[in-house]
Image (cartoon, rainbow, N blue to C red):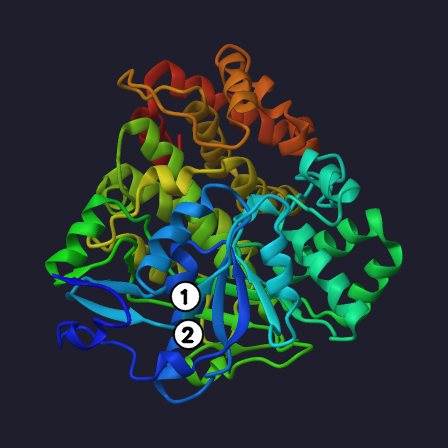
Amino acid sequence: MIALSNETLGSVPKAIEKPGYDRSKLTAGIVHIGLGNFHRAHQSWYLHRLMQSGLAQDWAIVGAGVRPYDNLMRAKLTAQDCLTTLIELDPSGISGEVVGSMIGYVPIEDGNGPLIEQMAEANIRIVSLTVTEGGYYIDPVTKGFDETHDDVRHDAANPGTPRTAFGAIVAALKLRRDQGIGPFTVQSCDNLQGNGAILRQTVVSLARLSDPDLAHWIDGNCAFPNSMVDCIVPATGSKEIALVREMGIDDAAPVTHENFRQWVIEDDFCAGRPDWAKAGAQFSDNVHGYEAQKIRILNAGHQVIANVAEVLGIETVSQAMQHPQVAALFRKVEMEEIVPHVTPVPGMTPAAYVDLVETRFSNPRIIDTIRRIAFDGSSRHTGMVLPTVRDALAADAPLDGLALVEAAWARMCEGTRDDGSEISPNDPFWDQLNAAAKEAKSSPAAWLAQRNLYGDLADDPRFAGSFARWLNLIYRDGMEAALKIHLKGA
């Protein structure tokens, strides 16, 4: 068993690819905030591939976090010199690779002083983020910046000692402006349509609350490229730790991932960038189209099956796709109610993308939990499912399956499965959702009355009526019976 570190790289089993570059000569160019599994399997991997070709040696990543729980990841990664073992779970076999594109991890402190100082250094030209879809302080109905959040109010009142990643970015940019260093690109890598535009809104709006002149400078000088990111990356647990040990490596934070990656990026960078295209990334002026296809079909597809599967007691995505009714629901909703509202992108029709996603979801080697994909429904349904509901209403198109999906979410948030077992809280706003779900058990309109989620959808009789019918049926006859009735077209 090899304890992963710079010193032991030479002893890594030959079957596992390892960095061929001298990591001691790498210099930092990127700070990444929110250093979870997805970043290490996706953006970090693209940079690693460039480094393997002798490129981008001055673009190494420094990891960062702003929450106390990030300390655990920092401890694990710094103990192994910020190396990560990636394990690709192809249906035809398993392979491993050690990635070395990350060279440091900023100490995590209240007020985020070390992070601000790191981002203010002149060699940092990109600050990227994966902070989850719900982490951008967006009002779910208006889509505007939520100035009322306690974190936002804190950072507006205390710009020198911010609580949020965005507050730290604003503070670092102030230092760079005042010192004449110049701006950096701020790059979102989260599953949000128009993620760069949303990130610009968050950073500039937050800056405006404390320093309007700085906000104007940021808006005029920094770049916020839109991008679409895609790779299924399960959470790491005991099985993943055991798997990397079977490969001969002691890695405290390995990452498993599927045999598919995609990264489509708007070429809008104010201080240079790595040539990610040479590692397979795609630069395009139509990022919005790729984003829309992925969010509407893949991410919404997760929500189509997530709550149904949770209520039925199904544990993983691939198991859900083996369940006849769940798999059929996925196919029917995607092809009949989602695909008609998605515009093709070069090389991929929406229907073909559904086929691809269906294959990816069915990969039995990917132990992607239903609990993970069901997490944070309050942002995922509002951002990934409900836009299609609105399109269907505007076009007088079918939406009965989408109404069933929303009813399944309400049923899941009631907190029990069909077998009576308990569902643990799984949303930042669980208390609100759980209370509304319990009330909706006897009065379905109570769920749609959550205006912060549904806006005026509760007022539409076609959607509200279908939703109420499905929720009542689910409680009366059970989830599987409801699925069978929907699939029969009854």
Are the two marked residues, 1 and 2, in contact with CB atoms closer than 8 angstroms? yes
Query: Could you tell me residue 431's position as x and y percent?
Result: 53, 21
Q: Is residue 232 visible?
A: no
Residue at screen point 48% across, 59% down: 294
Residue at screen point 38% across, 55% down: 37
Element carrying mark 2: helix
Whether residue 325 is situated above or below residue 476 in the rendered picture? below
Element carrying mark 1: loop
| Number of numbered labels in the structure image | 2
Residue at screen point 49% across, 66% down: 62
Residue 191 or 303: which is nearer the viewer?
191
- Point out the image quarter for the C terminus: top left
- Disc 1 crowd rating (10 Å Cα; few below 14, some 14-19, many 20+) is many
Q: Residue type at mark 1?
A: His
Q: Quadrant of residue 216?
A: bottom right
Residue 464 or 59: which is nearer the viewer?
59
Query: Could you tell me residue 298's position as x and y percent?
Result: 43, 54
Location of mark 1 (residue): 42
Residue at screen point 37% across, 45% down: 330
- In-image side of 308 versus 181 (left or right): left
- In-image side of 464 versus 293 (left or right): right
Q: Quadrant of residue 315?
A: top left
Q: Residue type at mark 2?
A: Tyr
Q: Residue furthest top?
A: 442
- Point out the image quarter for the N terminus: bottom left
**Disc number at residue 238?**
none
Q: Is residue 25 visible?
A: yes
Residue 330 or 237: which is nearer the viewer?
237
Location of mark 2 (residue): 46
Per the model, the C-alpha gap separating discs 1 and 2 is 6 Å
Q: Quadrant of residue 21?
A: bottom left
Query: Could you tell me residue 68's position as x and y percent?
Result: 49, 41
